[in-house]
Image (spheres, grey):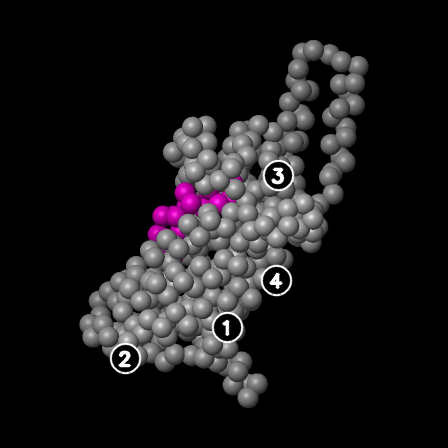
């Protein structure tokens, strides 16, 4: 999931360009609030996308219900600490890179739409330095509950077998012994020890394939929706005069469309970055191998797994970010600090 907050919303909404520290504070606050609000839906998305054989969950609500029942309320937030820890440095890289690209692409203080697209793509490419390991660790923690549920389903299946054995009565009881929960620190250390730094960046190519098209779809679509019903010189940035609710709805709509459009790429990325596989589940050698295996074993519809969850995650994230920028929280904090 990508639980990340858009960078250039203020470009379309506010005539005045705020400073990098203010944008960093706005992005960090939006990220922290957004992750906290929508993380359970992102967890459901990851678990649904990783289902290959036995269907542990029939949908988003079923996944969340079973997660709360088996792991408690905070089970829905497994992996959230990784996002909350790394969301600020991710924003620092993305916002700084975006500003640099915008300055390089601007002509006479004006930036055309194609420049906005390229700046967003460049910023998204740079942030992969933090995004890839963050997503990798988050996915392992999010998917642990699905694997445990799948094992319990598999363990209960032999109980219905007509062939009696002497040890049959005892096989059902060890289900109380739960494997120790892995932490982000233990997963990181294990990857560094066994695979080196490369292990933390598994799925980098798939992450780029998802994030760059997302930016290319989102930013121009947001600009068009945000300008609906208003006139003005494009170079004069008429989007700066958009009312808050129009910008809020434009951000939600554009984010949802872009999220659903790149869902197939997100499914591939999630599968590639999942280290622990369930019984009978495929392992993949790369993007092309993953695409072929999913098509052969699960059909084209498998590429849309979690699409509803992604739309429900991305829309509020962009709405929250829009609200944070509109309120100017970063500017107010800097004003208080002097």
Q: CA distance from mark 1 to mark 2?
A: 26 Å
Of callouts 1 and 4, which one flags the residue occurring earlier in the amino acid sequence?
1
> Principal SS element in the magenta part?
helix
Q: CA distance from mark 1 to mark 3?
A: 35 Å
Q: Position of residue 31 (x, y in %)?
A: 52, 64
Q: Which residue is mark 3?
A: 276
Q: CA distance from mark 2 to mark 3?
A: 52 Å
Q: Which mark is residue 24?
A: 1
For the record, the magenta segment spans 254-271
Q: Residues within 10 Å of mark 1 (few under 14, many from 20)?
A: many
Q: Comparing marks 1 and 2, which lies closer to the viewer? A: 2
Q: Which residue is mark 2?
A: 108
Q: Comparing marks 2 and 3, which lies closer to the viewer? A: 2
Of callouts 4 and 3, which one flags the residue occurring earlier in the amino acid sequence?
4
Viewer-proximal residue among 230 and 128: 128
Q: Position of residue 4 (x, y in %)?
A: 48, 59
Of callouts 4 and 2, which one flags the residue occurring earlier in the amino acid sequence?
4
Q: Residues within 10 Å of mark 4 (few under 14, many from 20)?
A: few
């Amino acid at each position: 999931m990508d639980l990340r907050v858009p960078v250039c919303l203020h470009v379309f909404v506010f005539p005045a360009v705020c400073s990098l520290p203010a944008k960093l504070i706005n992005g960090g606050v939006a990220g922290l609030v957004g992750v906290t609000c929508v993380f359970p839906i992102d967890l459901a998305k990851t678990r649904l996308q990783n289902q290959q054989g036995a269907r542990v969950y029939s949908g988003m609500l079923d996944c969340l219900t079973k997660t709360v029942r088996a792991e408690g309320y905070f089970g829905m937030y497994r992996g959230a600490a990784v996002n909350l820890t790394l969301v600020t440095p991710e924003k620092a890289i993305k916002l700084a890179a975006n500003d640099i690209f915008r300055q390089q692409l601007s002509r006479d203080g004006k930036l055309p739409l194609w420049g906005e697209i390229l700046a967003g793509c460049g910023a998204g490419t740079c942030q992969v330095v933090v995004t890839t390991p963050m997503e990798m660790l988050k996915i392992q923690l999010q998917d642990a509950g699905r694997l445990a549920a799948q094992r319990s389903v598999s363990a209960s299946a032999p109980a219905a077998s007509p062939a009696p054995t002497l040890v049959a009565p005892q096989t059902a009881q060890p289900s109380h012994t739960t494997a120790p929960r892995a932490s982000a620190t233990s997963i990181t250390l294990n990857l560094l020890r066994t695979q080196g730094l490369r292990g933390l960046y598994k799925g980098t190519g798939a992450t780029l394939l998802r994030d760059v098209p997302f930016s290319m779809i989102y930013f121009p679509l947001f600009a068009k929706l945000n300008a609906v019903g208003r006139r003005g010189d494009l170079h004069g940035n008429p989007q700066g005069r958009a009312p808050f609710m129009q910008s809020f709805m434009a951000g939600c709509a554009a984010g949802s469309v872009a999220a659903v459009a790149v869902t197939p790429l997100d499914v591939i990325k999630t599968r590639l970055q999942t280290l622990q596989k369930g019984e009978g589940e495929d392992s993949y050698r790369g993007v092309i191998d993953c695409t072929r295996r999913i098509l052969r074993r699960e059909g084209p519809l498998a590429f849309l797994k979690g699409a509803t969850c992604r739309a429900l995650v991305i829309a509020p994230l962009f709405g929250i970010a829009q609200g944070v920028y509109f309120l100017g929280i970063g500017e107010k904090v800097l004003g208080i600090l002097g």
